[in-house]
Image (cartoon, helix red, strand yellow):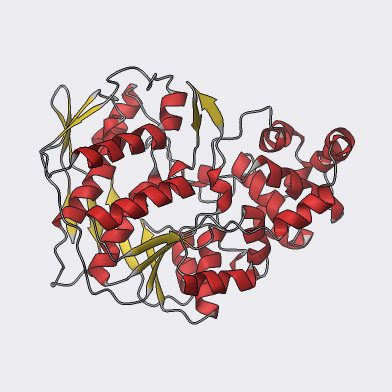
């Protein structure tokens, strides 16, 4: 199935991005409203080029409350974009959304009790897949624009018939970016939420299990009175809003949730440390995939210089041997003096937390501390021991508490909650 969208910005610049979902078959449920909503979230990648104060929708209908929901998503989910481009989103009439006013009834489908798990290249979705596999829960992988790493992970988890979608950005957008039009972060996990629900309807899956964790709830920096969170569409706040919106306006009996929500990143890292078969396969570095608006080809390997690389290195180190860490990253990142400012951004509450998918400052500090306690070596850990740890108290107790932590704010169905509780 191929879906094309049409967006237009002044002066008469038209975009026609596409999404192709493979092997959908001939018989499909009524999906027009689901496709319309996918177009709404796709729109943000093109709207941001000009940050127009007016969005005019002609392809479908929304109620006033739905319009408010979308305005809220744009303000919250585009926060990093506003911050980095110095845009004042607090001004009166910053954004209006105009469209035909009507309510669409949510679908009620006879969905099978099986789970669709969105899969990326990182440790979190791998952990979810392996837990489902171990407990013999029926599931399938869903991946968007799978990389070589994703394909290897699919093979390793023995997923025979994954659901695959290909998203094609209109190249005119990249040309505008290179010409100086506005660019920046969009709420990608919100895009995946709408796309996953569409695929759940097409392929008959009742459960949509993301792998977003508790750590995503912490923001990065305050801007114009609002906390900016790079991971907003991974937060429990977004999850609750989307779950409610989905039941009212998309499919009322599909279950969208995050399987790892009760856990911190460091707890997930401890579980992932028991899955060494994936060490050569996973890749969480976002720098590895960047094309810089189409100017470069993605490098597809750990850069070893960014905050994400250092964070992942730190949370795995207490649970993985030095030899295995070297095999994954190619070098000891704790020995890199140039990464000292990055470490301080990760752990210092007085600094802006890196605008990346990293854990809380508290767990980052505990990860470095636990690595030091495990006799891991390097300049960063020496600096930590000399200049930071003497000012901290009860770190051993805090580490034990965090590694046993359980967040009751989650949407896991009871049968999945019981499975994770035994592991976490």
Q: Residue at x 48, y 67 (%)?
A: 152
Residue 321 visible to an observer of this rendering: yes
The answer to whether 341 appears left or right of 5 in the picture is right
Return the x and y of residue 326 as percentages of the image width and height.
72, 56
Quadrant hosting residue 21: bottom left
The outermost residue toward the bottom is 136
Up/down of 337 relative to 395, above or below: above
Up/down of 42 relative to 119, above or below: above
Up/down of 277 relative to 336, above or below: below
The answer to whether 43 appears left or right of 281 in the picture is left
Return the x and y of residue 67 as percentages of the image width and height.
23, 37
Q: Residue at x 46, y 79 (%)?
A: 137
Quadrant hosting residue 204: bottom left
Picture quarter with the C terminus: bottom right
Q: Residue at x 43, y 45 (%)?
A: 233
The answer to whether 351 appears left or right of 246 in the picture is right
Query: Looking at the image, which is closer to me, 65 or 295?
Result: 65
The answer to whether 122 appears left or right of 96 in the picture is right
Return the x and y of residue 359 as percentages of the image width and height.
61, 46
Quadrant hosting residue 186: top left
Residue 277 visible to an observer of this rendering: no
Q: Residue at x 62, y 54 (%)?
A: 264
């Amino acid at each position: 199935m191929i879906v094309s969208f049409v967006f237009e910005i002044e002066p008469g610049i038209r975009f026609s991005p596409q999404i192709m979902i493979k092997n959908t078959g001939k018989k499909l449920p009524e999906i027009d409203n689901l496709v319309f909503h996918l177009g709404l979230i796709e729109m943000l990648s093109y709207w941001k080029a000009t940050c127009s104060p007016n969005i005019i929708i002609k392809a479908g209908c929304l109620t006033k409350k739905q319009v408010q929901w979308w305005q809220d998503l744009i303000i919250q989910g585009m926060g990093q974009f506003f911050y980095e481009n110095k845009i004042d989103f607090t001004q009166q009439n910053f954004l209006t959304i105009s469209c035909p006013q009507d309510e669409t009834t949510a679908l009620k489908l006879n969905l099978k009790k099986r789970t669709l798990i969105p899969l990326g290249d990182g440790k979190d979705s791998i952990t979810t897949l392996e837990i489902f596999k171990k407990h013999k829960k029926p599931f399938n992988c869903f991946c968007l624009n799978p990389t070589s790493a994703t394909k290897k992970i699919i093979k390793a988890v023995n997923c025979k018939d994954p659901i695959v979608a290909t998203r094609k950005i209109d190249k005119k957008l990249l040309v505008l970016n290179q010409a100086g039009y506005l660019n920046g972060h969009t709420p990608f996990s919100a895009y995946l939420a709408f796309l996953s629900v569409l695929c759940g309807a097409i392929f008959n899956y009742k459960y949509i299990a993301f792998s977003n964790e508790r750590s995503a709830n912490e923001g990065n920096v305050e801007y114009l009175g609002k906390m900016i969170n790079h991971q907003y569409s991974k937060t429990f706040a977004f999850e609750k809003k989307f779950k409610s919106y989905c039941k009212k306006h998309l499919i009322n009996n599909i279950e969208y949730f995050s399987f790892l929500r009760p856990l911190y990143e460091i707890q997930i890292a401890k579980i992932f440390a028991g899955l060494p078969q994936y060490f050569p396969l996973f890749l969480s570095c976002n720098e590895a995939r960047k094309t810089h608006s189409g100017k470069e080809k993605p490098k597809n390997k750990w850069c070893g210089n960014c905050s994400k690389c250092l964070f992942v290195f730190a949370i795995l180190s207490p649970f993985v041997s030095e030899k295995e860490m070297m095999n994954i990253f190619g070098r000891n990142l704790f020995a890199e003096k140039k990464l000292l400012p990055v470490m301080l951004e990760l752990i210092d509450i007085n600094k802006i937390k890196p605008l990346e998918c990293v854990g809380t400052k508290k767990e980052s500090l505990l990860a470095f501390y636990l690595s030091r306690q495990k006799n891991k070596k390097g300049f960063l850990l020496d600096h930590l021991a000399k200049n930071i740890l003497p000012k901290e108290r009860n770190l051993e107790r805090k580490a034990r508490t965090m590694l046993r932590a359980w967040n009751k704010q989650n949407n896991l169905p009871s049968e999945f909650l019981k499975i994770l509780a035994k592991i976490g």
